Image (cartoon, rainbow, N blue to C red):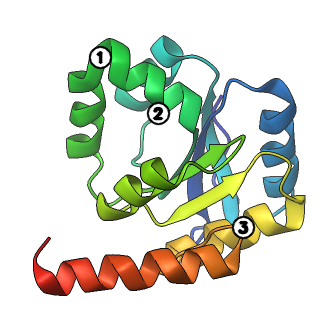
Amino acid sequence: MKQPNVSGDAKSVVILEKDGRFLADIKEALKGDSELRIIGEGVDLPGATALLMEWIDEMPDIIVAGLDLLKEGVASDASALMGLKEKMPGTKLIITSERYADEEIFRMIQEGIRGFFLKGTPVVLITKCIRVVLSGGMWMDNAVIARVFEEVSSRNEKAGV
């Protein structure tokens, strides 16, 4: 699905989410926002990979991806996911999930992912999360957890971990 660029300054978003209810929530959050525009969406792994590698004409600023879809990707074709990462080095990734698993989230933070929110997050917080991540900040639903991860991550970076 392609949409015209409503504004030259609009940031482009690709949504990769197989949960139809949550996909609808994300689309609702972005609908009518002149600063964010959806340039593609995928609901399964083959479709998501084809979308990012072949169908869209521009590199997205943000990819909002379901954790379960990414796990399937790693299990079935990790090299394709690494190829996407190399093709889109400036794209920021935001993860959606049913729940937080500390070890998974911490590993992703160390890999540079700065945005996380739970399925069921209020629509207004979805766009806020995207803006925070675009500006270089970190966003999690729970601000206390976000600060803890940020502090631990900073300590590990200084220690060279």
Q: Secondary structure at mark 3?
A: loop
Which quadrant: the N terminus?
Answer: top right
Mark number for residue 134? none
> 46 or 122: nearer the eye?
122
Q: Secondary structure at mark 2?
A: loop
| Mark 2 lies on residue | 56
User: In which quadrant of the rendered view does residue 43 lie?
Assistant: top right
Q: Please indicate, yes or no, whether residue 35 appears anywhere in the rendered image.
A: no
Compare marks 2 and 1 and give the one earlier in the sequence. Answer: 2
State the image coordinates of residue 161 (x, y, percent, origin top left): 14, 70
User: In which quadrant of the rendered view does residue 52 lie?
Assistant: top left
Mark number for residue 77? 1
User: In which quadrant of the rendered view does residue 39 lie?
Assistant: top right
The Cα–Cα distance between marks 3 and 2, rounded to whole angstroms, is: 30 Å
Q: Secondary structure at mark 1?
A: helix
Amino acid, disc 1: Asp
Whether residue 102 sits left or right of residue 19 in the image: it is: left
User: Where 11 sits versus 79, above or below?
Assistant: below
10 Å crowding of disc 2: few (<14), some (14-19), many (20+): some
| Mark 3 lies on residue | 141
Q: Nearer the viewer, mark 2 or mark 1?
A: 1
